[in-house]
Image: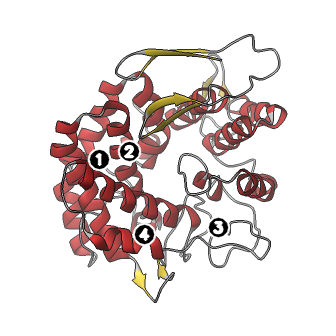
Amino acid sequence: MGLSGLGYNGHVFWDTELWMYPPLLVLQPGIAKSLLEYRFQRLPAARQNAFSHGYQGAMFPWESSDEGSEDTPVWALTGPFQHHITGCIGWAFWKYYQVTKDKIWLRDRGYPMLKEVADFWASRVERKGPGKYEINNVIGANEWQENIDNNAFTNGMAITVLRYATQAAKELGIAPNPDWDHVAQNIPILKFEDGTTKENATYDGVMIKQADVNLLAFPLDIVSDKAQVERDLNYYEPRMSPEGPAMGSSVLALLYARMGNTAKATEWFAKAYKPNEVPPFGVLAETAGGSNPYFATGAGGFLQAVMFGFGGLQVNDGGISQLKTKLPPGWKGLEIKGAGIDERSFKN
């Protein structure tokens, strides 16, 4: 909620890295860098948190404030079990390097963070044999499923940051820990018999709070095959609760835009903000019909749907580039100005 109200007590969640950070990274890299610095300055507290739970590396809190300690209310299970936050932070650090290619920052900030994050995941997995390095007893992006095993988004993020840590080490001429890549290769992404990605080991098709599996296609690159992306969209779209937070809808809008399904993209884009507008200024509440603005997370999702969905921007090792996408009916054009450290413009 930023400074707009008392919602969530001003704490910092994954909302920062996965939802608000990507548009800032493209349009305001200096501000994005400051968000990462907040995490880096709290790395000692995260190391202590990992040690207290019997893990290596750094384990970041689900709700962080000034000291970087775990400040989630004691009645919420998200604090003890929503471990994907540590992956989200590592992911954001590598994304900054992809955009800026700042090797001094990578040496002093990026790699030290990624090393600690990778060490955490290598110690967090339960090693049960080849292809079965499981991550059990977690809460994923869909917070309505608690104490689950092998959550799709959690496992996918762990795989991603383990690989990023290896890549960062090589970029600096450092020999990476071979265990990082070994663990990444053995973390499973579960599937149903028909090939649809399974949200967790016991998922049985119930309504979900927000996108989880679909995050493997964006912002992660775990699922890239178009047929697989479409299969997962077709399965989870009707299971998305209308009572979920705004950013879940924005992910579906973004993916449909990249798939070329303009009708679906436009439909889900409207769902990402229209029901959440609060009068008199139309600022966004967290959920449809809600009254707790301003939900900066939803704004981040909205911007990502525009920039990375309809605008086709992508951030990878080549920096910022653009995919071919179609605009919604009635849109005459879209121009994104000042992107990246060289302030490029992208038109669609």
Q: Residue at x 50, y 64 (%)?
A: 154
State the mark number for residue 65: 1
Which percent across, then down, holds residue 228? 72, 57
Percent position of residue 237, x then y = 77, 52
In the drawing, does residue 70 fall left or right of residue 296?
left
Total number of numbered labels?
4
Sequence order check, earlier mark of 3 and 4: 4
Amino acid marked by disc 3: Glu
Residue holding disc 3 = 199
The amino acid sitting under disc 2 is Ala
Relative to 215, say whether 334 is above or below: above
| Image-quadrant location for residue 195 | bottom right
Q: State which tag comes first along the sequence, 3 or 1.
A: 1
- Outermost residue, top direction? 332
Q: Which residue is mark 2?
A: 92
Residue 213's image quarter? bottom right
Q: Residue at x 78, y 30 (%)?
A: 266
Confirm whether residue 79 shows in the render. Answer: yes
